């Protein structure tokens, strides 16, 4: 039986047809369709050796996509780490706009949605580049990129202007998240190395090769060295971690009950708070009561009871008038922390019937439970009957209802006089100063915003028995940072959450961090070198095994290697009229997907 062998040689047309079965056509079609709406094969093109991966316009679009990715990530990270202060942001907008709406969560959802969209586009682009395809971004996606870019820039600029202190929060967050961001960044660079290596070895111009590789390596080596500049109080020697900071309920437990109500303070005590914080105002007839805002509009139903006095200063109401107001309905209707649904039926009923408490009622709750109290005292406006005597009036109530040693006295006005009248009060300052100035004023505690957190300063003050309280810390990661920094106490909205944290969320020794850093860099370098080596082998046609035979041709998926230089297709073909006779005929196999 004769066998006819038809040698294919190096016929490029036949080779391409043979190789089409290895081109992952459904995968590439899906990528190109989602990225550029090029669902049909004739609509897209492969980047030929020496060609750029895209036109100048598409190159600009790809660069804009990368820029938008980083800016949208920056804003999303910035805003997600600002979650500790969402309540303040929403109430700021309430004061400005006059109505309640959870703007902070809406902003977070929009930022997350836009970042996810941009990230998916970038993943599609990287996959297309990895498949050797030329990029073409559909006009609708270009519009979407511009929208995401405009949103990220505008939102960042506005919040930086109105809420610049949140950038300090972002820097603090890096003291906890930086090691994990470092791992994520190096993982991303390892993934990106695939298309970078592919196009580096396919470029004909040395200048382009040097530019591409130089940019990639500069970013990579910078990430390798980033840990050298990292500082975190949570990287410390074993056995040097101090006790957990005491928890002081900020206006009670405002996530579980209406703020600055008896119910709120009782909830804070039940949750394990070691102190209670509030704000004190003097009524028109001289009764100190609890109210944070200058008006009653936010936390009472004054619009229903006194509709013509909604913007009047809270201290211009008599105690009898204040007792007519409901201080709990607003909490149930607005649900500022999204926690109302978790309340029991009993708690729901109790919250609905809360009234404005007096300072005396607040102190009685603290005295019964043996808790510390910390309060800010607001001076009444000019013309108020107690605008000059509000300090002495408040001090009299304090001395009548609680042991003075339980009181952290924060008001700075007439501090020397107050100290002389009642030396048992724990004098507390709301501003940093030199140790000499603090000791001269008999300061025993500092009450500072968490953004000023510094392990060195806390340790310095602690050396002269001056404790540090940080406010307002409600997120576990911030509490972890305050714990590691050595803060003695924190004011918080979430006593019920932080009281369950038994150890810092992030804590490691310098040796453990160094090992993590070295291993991450080593694994990343190995992967990058391996990927570049693979692409060098594939594009240069160098076999891994010396006994292998291969045909060299540029481009990804352009090498079809066999153990024989011939491709044989065997079939029966009759050569004579005798049906039993036949011969094996070699025919080329052609695939047309």
Image (cartoon, rainbow, N blue to C red):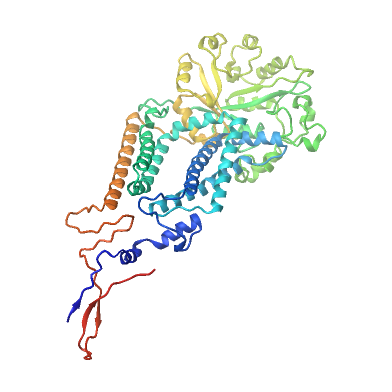
Examine the rendering and report whether any part of residue 244 can be seen: no
| Horizontal arrangement in the rendering, residue 87 relative to residue 523 (left or right) | right
Q: Locate the N terminus by quadrant.
A: bottom left
Q: Position of residue 424 (x, y in %)?
A: 59, 14
| Horizontal arrangement in the rendering, residue 45 relative to residue 81 (left or right) | left
How many numbered marks have been drawn onto this rendered protein structure? 0
| 313 is higher (above) or lower (below) than 32 | above
| Horizontal arrangement in the rendering, residue 546 relative to residue 119 (left or right) | left
x 41%, y 49%: residue: 52
Q: Position of residue 476 (x, y in %)?
A: 50, 35
x 78%, y 22%: residue: 284
Give the farthest residue toward the bottom: 577
Q: Which sits in the foreground, 29 or 332?
A: 29
Among the 4 quarters of the image, the one containing residue 94 = top right
| 381 is higher (above) or lower (below) than 65 | above
Among the 4 quarters of the image, the one containing residue 325 = top right
| 287 is higher (above) or lower (below) than 41 | above
Examine the rendering and report whether any part of residue 44 can be seen: yes
Q: Which sits in the foreground, 286 or 474?
A: 474
x 64%, y 24%: residue: 363
Q: Position of residue 332 (x, y in %)?
A: 67, 42
Q: Position of residue 11 (x, y in %)?
A: 29, 65
Among the 4 quarters of the image, the one containing residue 28 = bottom left
Q: Locate the C terminus by quadrant.
A: bottom left
Q: Which sits in the foreground, 455 or 174?
A: 174
| 10 is higher (above) or lower (below) than 453 | below
């Amino acid at each position: 039986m004769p066998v006819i062998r038809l040698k294919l040689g190096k016929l490029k047309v036949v080779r391409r047809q043979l190789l089409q079965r290895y081109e992952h056509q459904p995968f590439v079609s899906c990528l190109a369709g989602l990225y550029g709406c090029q669902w049909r094969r004739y609509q897209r093109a492969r980047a030929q050796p020496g060609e750029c991966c895209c036109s100048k316009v598409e190159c600009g679009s790809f660069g804009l996509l990368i820029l938008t990715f980083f800016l949208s990530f920056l804003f999303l990270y910035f805003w997600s780490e600002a979650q500790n202060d969402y309540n303040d942001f929403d109430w700021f907008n309430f004061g400005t706009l006059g109505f309640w709406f959870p703007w902070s969560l809406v902003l977070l959802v929009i930022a997350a949605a836009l970042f996810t969209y941009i990230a998916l586009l970038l993943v599609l682009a990287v996959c297309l580049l990895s498949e050797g395809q030329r990029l073409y971004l559909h006009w609708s996606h270009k519009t979407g990129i511009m929208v995401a870019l405009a949103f990220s820039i505008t939102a960042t600029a506005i919040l930086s202007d109105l809420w610049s202190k949140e950038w300090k929060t972002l820097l603090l967050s890096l003291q906890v998240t930086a090691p994990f961001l470092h791992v994520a960044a190096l993982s991303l660079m390892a993934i990106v190395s695939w298309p970078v290596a592919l196009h580096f070895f396919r470029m004909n111009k040395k200048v382009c090769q040097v530019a591409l590789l130089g940019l990639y390596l500069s970013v990579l080596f910078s990430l390798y060295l980033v840990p050298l500049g990292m500082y975190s109080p949570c990287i410390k020697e074993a056995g040097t971690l101090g006790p957990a900071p005491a928890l002081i309920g900020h206006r009670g437990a405002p996530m579980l009950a209406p703020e600055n109500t008896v119910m709120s303070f009782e909830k804070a005590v039940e949750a394990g708070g070691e102190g209670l914080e509030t704000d004190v105002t003097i009524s028109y007839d001289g009764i100190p009561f609890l109210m944070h805002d200058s008006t009653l509009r936010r936390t009472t139903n004054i619009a229903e009871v006194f509709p013509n006095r909604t913007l009047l200063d809270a201290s211009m109401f008599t105690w009898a008038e204040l007792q007519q107001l409901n201080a709990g309905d607003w909490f149930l209707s607005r649900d500022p922390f999204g926690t109302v649904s978790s309340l029991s039926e009993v708690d729901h009923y109790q919250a609905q019937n809360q009234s404005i408490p007096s300072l005396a009622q607040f102190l009685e709750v603290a005295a019964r439970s043996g808790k510390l109290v910390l309060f800010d005292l607001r001076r009444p406006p000019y013309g108020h009957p107690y605008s000059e005597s509000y300090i002495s009036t408040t001090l009299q109530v304090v001395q009548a209802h609680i042991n003075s040693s339980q009181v952290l006295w924060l008001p700075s006005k007439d501090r020397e006089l107050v100290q002389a009248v009642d030396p048992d009060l724990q004098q507390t300052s709301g501003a940093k100063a030199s140790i000499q100035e603090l000791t001269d004023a008999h300061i025993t505690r500092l009450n500072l915003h968490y953004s000023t957190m510094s392990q060195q300063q806390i340790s310095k003050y602690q050396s002269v028995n001056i404790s540090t309280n940080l406010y307002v810390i409600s997120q576990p990661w911030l509490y972890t940072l305050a714990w590691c920094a050595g803060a003695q106490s924190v004011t918080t909205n979430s006593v019920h959450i932080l009281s369950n944290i038994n150890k810092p969320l992030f804590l490691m020794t310098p040796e453990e961090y160094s090992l993590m850093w070295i291993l991450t860099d080593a694994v990343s370098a190995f992967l990058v070198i391996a990927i570049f080596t693979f692409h060098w082998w594939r594009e240069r046609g160098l076999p891994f095994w010396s006994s292998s035979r291969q045909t060299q041709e540029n481009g990804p998926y352009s090498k079809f290697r066999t153990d024989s230089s011939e491709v044989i297709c065997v079939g029966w073909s009759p050569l004579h009229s005798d049906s039993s006779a036949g011969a094996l005929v070699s025919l080329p196999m052609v695939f047309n997907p």
